[in-house]
Image: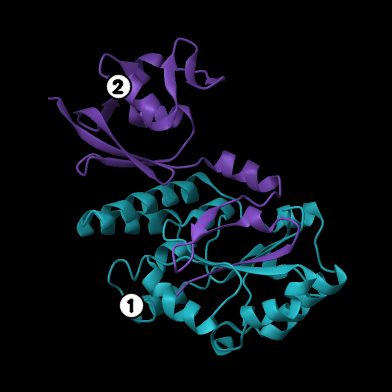
Amino acid sequence: MTETTRFTLIDGDRPVEVDATLAGDAVRVATAALRDATGWEFKPEGLCQGDVCVPVRDATALAGPGGVELAAFARALDRPLALDVAERAAALGTSAAERSARLATLQAPDFRLPDLSGRMHSLSEHRGKKVLLIAYASW
Amino acid sequence: MWQALHEELGSQGFVPFTVALDRSAEDARPFIERARPTHPSVIDSEHVVAQLYDVRNVPTMIWIDEAGRIVRPHDAQFGTDTFTAFHGKHAAPFLAAVRAWVREGKGALDPATVRSHTPQPTKATQLARAHRALAWWLHQQGRAEAAERHFLRAGELSPGDWTIRRGSMPIRGVNPMGPQFFELAKEGVPRYAAEALPLE
């Protein structure tokens, strides 16, 4: 029993709505929609983002007439996927390998966030100074 | 506290950059308005910094040098002695170390030491962050029950991540200073490898 529905895919912190076909736990998204949402496209060479392609072991599990299956897509990229079919939503995260590799460079990742007045501040604005990054909370 | 340090050391090229891992500007507002900072003081409701740096609890202090390199990783240190009775640390040694870093260039750690004292992401901790991101989005859509399921799943996957287990409490309508917090604290406060590093 399949059903076509709107589905929210959160890639990083960006929620994107796509059309998806649901069959049990499988969520299929059309190749073009997945490319627009995540930048990754399923091609004969495998899963590709720009010039980078990841070979796919089981292409038939990954992509069929309905499009690319989300969980298989996440596995192929070794990325974590928090999936909730009932809620028609999923969050695609960063792999441990990618996060580790980035932290291992010891280059402090840049970010841009708002202050209380809504004005944006980035870490890179302070290059050339010694920065004490303090993560805290009201909890 | 950090504002005072900024006023003291700012002319020597020092910038405290505070990041509130709070669900809204309103939660962080009392702290920021009391401090009246002239240094950057931002709100991180999406936990961008928590994810980029793999921060698992607050407070976490990271030293970043002029070239943008991490030279002292995740330290659980405090700017005051307000909660010393709970966590056992005094602020003075850390503040002295920061002053020595800024004034004399002392205390920056070599790359191998920084790496070996930085948290190591795993499949489970990363999947936990994905569940937290989904939970936060669901909460913002008003789907509290579904959000709750994913916050709890995230906590199961990464029990040592208090940015998830305690950080989600206000979002879920639970008092982060109340009984559920004390139950959580019985498991032991998450320990960082950086805590083994000396403060010169």
Name the one closer to the observer, A66 or B141: B141
**Which residue extends farthest right?**
B104
Q: Which residue is depicted at the point 24% across and 28% down?
A: A20
Q: Is residue B30 above or below residue B47?
A: below
Question: Disc 1 on helix, strand or loop?
Answer: loop
| Marks 2 and 1 on same chain | no
Say which chain tag 1 marks. B
Which disc, if any, is residue A78? Answer: none
Tell me what hue chain B is rendered in: cyan
Across and down, in percent, residue B75 comes to 65, 68
Q: Which residue is mark 1?
A: B175
* Quadrant position of the C terminus of chain A in the picture: bottom left
Classed neighbour count for the residue bearing mark 1: other residues with Cα under 10 Å, few (<14), some (14–19), many (≥20): some
Q: For this rendering, which residue is in front, B67 or A106?
A: B67
Q: Amino acid at mark 2?
A: Ala
State the CA–CA distance, disc 2 to disc 1: 43 Å
| Chain that the image shows in purple | A
- Percent coordinates x, y for residue B41 in the rendering: 54, 69
x, y percent for residue B107: 82, 68
* Tag 2 secondary structure: loop
Image quarter hosting the N terminus of chain A: top left
Asked if the residues shown at circle 2 and circle 1 are in contact, with their CB atoms under 8 angstroms apart, the answer is no
Read off the chain for label 2: A
Give the vertical position of A92 relative to A67 (above or below).
below
Residue B144 visible in the shown view: yes
Q: Is B166 placed above or below A94 here?
A: below
Q: How is the image coloured?
A: by chain
At x 63%, y 43%, the residue is: A102
Farthest residue, direction top: A44
Type of amino acid under label 1: Asn
- State the residue position of label 2: A30
